[in-house]
Amino acid sequence: MENSTNNSMVVSSDEKFCHSCGEKIKSMAEICPKCGVRQMATTTANSEEKSLLVTILLAYFLGSFGGHNFYIDRTTKGVLSVVFFMTCVPAILSLLDILSMTRLNIQALNTKYNQKFTDCEKGVKTLFFVLSVIALIAIPIIILSYGILFIVAIVSGAFSSYV
């Protein structure tokens, strides 16, 4: 009897234990056949815990350059953010990432971003949610204001001496 329990605790190179029920399953299995829970990918790059607060701060202050994407190992998206930062699209996408990170619970975040996050206080998440909503509202208003000012300057002939 003792020998069978020792064999059940040993897994071969093509097996692993389910994250939810602990059942021995194939290492390539995406869903546990016993409990039906989706298995998180186990890679060495994503095995260290990432701070959700650091991720949110990087997204808020360096989101235009993809700072948070590099931190959570989404290097391709980070490189694209650096290449296209002048278009303001990465800034808007980072604000949307912040909205997502502040509204989802920690388990949903771990699944969505394939990471192990340490949670931060609810007040901090709420603060950055509100700041992101304000920024998402302000960006189109600022762009429209500069567009209107530019059109008024052209119509009034402010640039006629340069032509």
Image: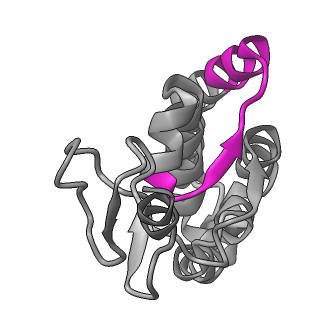
In the image, farthest residue toward the front:
1
Image quarter for residue 28? bottom left
Question: Does residue 124 show up magenta in the picture?
Answer: yes
The residue that appears at 51% across and 41% down in the rendered structure is 109
Please say which color scheme the image uses.
one colour
Q: Nearer the viewer, residue 30 or 26?
A: 26
Task: Locate residue 49, reporting x and y percent.
Answer: 75, 54
The residue that appears at 70% across and 71% down in the rendered structure is 70
The residue that appears at 38% across and 85% down in the rendered structure is 14
Instruction: Specify the segment rendered in magenta.
Output: 112-131
Q: Nearer the viewer, residue 51 or 152?
A: 51
Relative to 41, does residue 107 appear above or below in the rendering?
above
Q: Which quadrant of the figure contains the C terminus?
A: bottom right
The secondary structure making up most of the magenta span is: helix
In the image, farthest residue toward the bottom:
13
Relative to 21, does residue 58 appear above or below in the rendering?
below
Q: Which quadrant of the figure contains the N terminus?
A: bottom left
Question: Does residue 73 show up magenta in the picture?
Answer: no
Task: Locate residue 159, reporting x and y percent.
Answer: 64, 64
The residue that appears at 70% across and 59% down in the rendered structure is 68
- Residue 28: tell me if it is visible: yes
Task: Locate residue 8, reporting x and y percent.
Answer: 42, 63
In the image, farthest residue toward the top:
123
